[in-house]
Amino acid sequence: MGFLQHAPQLEHPYRGDRVLLALLDRVIPAERREALDADLDALADYALAAWQRAAASTRRQPVLTQWDAWGRRIDRIELTPAWLEGPHVTTRHAVLAAGHEAHEHARVEEFARVYLYHLASEFYTCPLAMTDGAATALKTAGNVALTERALPHFLSRDPAAFWLSGQWMTENAGGSDVGNTETLARQDEHGQWRLYGRKWFSSAVVGEAALALARPDGAGAGANALALFYVETMDGAQRKPELVIDRLKDKLGTRELPTAEIHLDGLPAWPVGELAHGVRQVAPMLNVTRSWNAVCAVASMTRAIALARDYAVRRAAFGRPLIEQPLHAQTLADMQAEFEGAFALAFEVAHLLGRVEQGAASPQEAAVLRLLTPLAKLWTARLAVRLCSEALECFGGAGYIEDTGLPQLLRDAQVYPIWEGTTNVLALDHLRALAGQGLDALRAA
């Protein structure tokens, strides 16, 4: 019959991950491990099944239907199976809620779940990150009414009550340059704030809520005049008519994630805080989502390396397995070393975030967290692209073939340097953090 090549197999993503196990053994108290292990085992089982399911099926993408058969605007988005399962997996295993428990290890426990769930979720973790950030921003703002309204949904462990939140900042005028935001906020005759404008990049449009930047009517120009608003997108089972979906983006990667361009035509909104300095109010959200970005980037790295390592045992060339070829073995070892450094940095940031949020951190630790968060996002994002590219090369021509599922690793990884601040934006943010006493905190760390 001739030569047949065996496909790479995925080891159990939790029990086979010595780096994650070593971290949890070192950081998590013994009395917390049993419950945590149960969730991590289940999420790893789900990830393993998702990999096998993807290998045996044709990839699906979300589909937008804007009009029904009778001419009514419906803007219905059909989601992939993994996205339909997302609320159930998230709430059953506390993927989001774990990060808001009242102990200093909460963020490490949360991000261990994220690390295992991310690729299997088909980037459902993107709106989860937005929701986590929105919950954090609302708590930081101290808006009791909105906190009591939204947080029970954002952090729910009941799929029927669970809500996703978006983060609506990017507009046609640019992403990082939010000072050019054109969305306006006006009060109607009843005093209700309403938003009017276009958001060019919305990755959580299927959610039930969002935080959005807008310029209050009569406010001046520039970023400081912007306000942060909370909105809800659904009216029962129907999307509110003041939220219009123009189209879904046709993207290089993350294609299962329904990223949309939207119009806001009088969508009801509530100020999160004062009617100015909205960028400052949304900053706590960015710190959380950048941590998600870093952990998801290392999740992509470990998947690429795991598959390349397994393939090196199965694939023979020049009379012996690839793993016995010195240069190939060195390549895998170098990739693993770089990944482990990135993993350590991402989870150090997660640990510091949890300590700071729970009031257990020293002032020096808080300063180090401020310094490391943009740096961790920057480095892990760029490294993920390079390591996923290297992993594809480890497969030779098979790494370039769509049916193997391998090219998707590289396409999806390319989003990490773009989300939550590009490299230059993050570099400048890190320089701002170094001002004052920042450098002293880093030297003492």
Image (cartoon, rainbow, N blue to C red):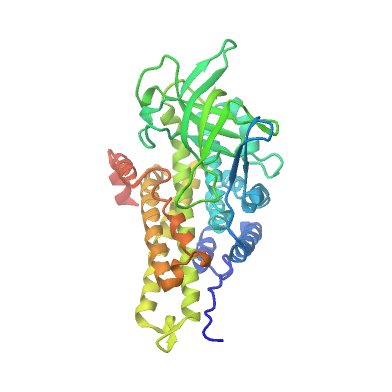
- Which of 198 and 212 lies nearest the eye of the viewer? 198
Quadrant containing the N terminus in the rendered view:
bottom right
Is 387 located above or below residue 360 in the figure?
below
Q: Residue furthest front?
A: 70
Q: Is residue 347 visible?
A: no
* Quarter of the image where one finds residue 217: top left
Residue at 70% over, 34% down = 237
Name the spot of residue 18 as percent of width and height, x first: 51, 69
Q: Is residue 326 left or right of residue 80?
A: left
Residue at 62% over, 62% down = 57
- Which of 186 and 201 lies nearest the eye of the viewer? 201
Total numbered circles = 0
Name the spot of residue 355 as percent of width and height, x first: 49, 46
Q: Residue furthest bottom?
A: 319
Q: Is residue 431 visible?
A: yes
Residue at 49% over, 44% down = 360
Q: Residue furthest top?
A: 189
Name the spot of residue 364 as percent of width and height, x first: 37, 45
* Quarter of the image where one finds residue 116: bottom right
Name the spot of residue 16 as percent of width and height, x first: 55, 70
Is 410 located above or below residue 126 in the figure?
below
- Which of 230 and 195 lies nearest the eye of the viewer? 195
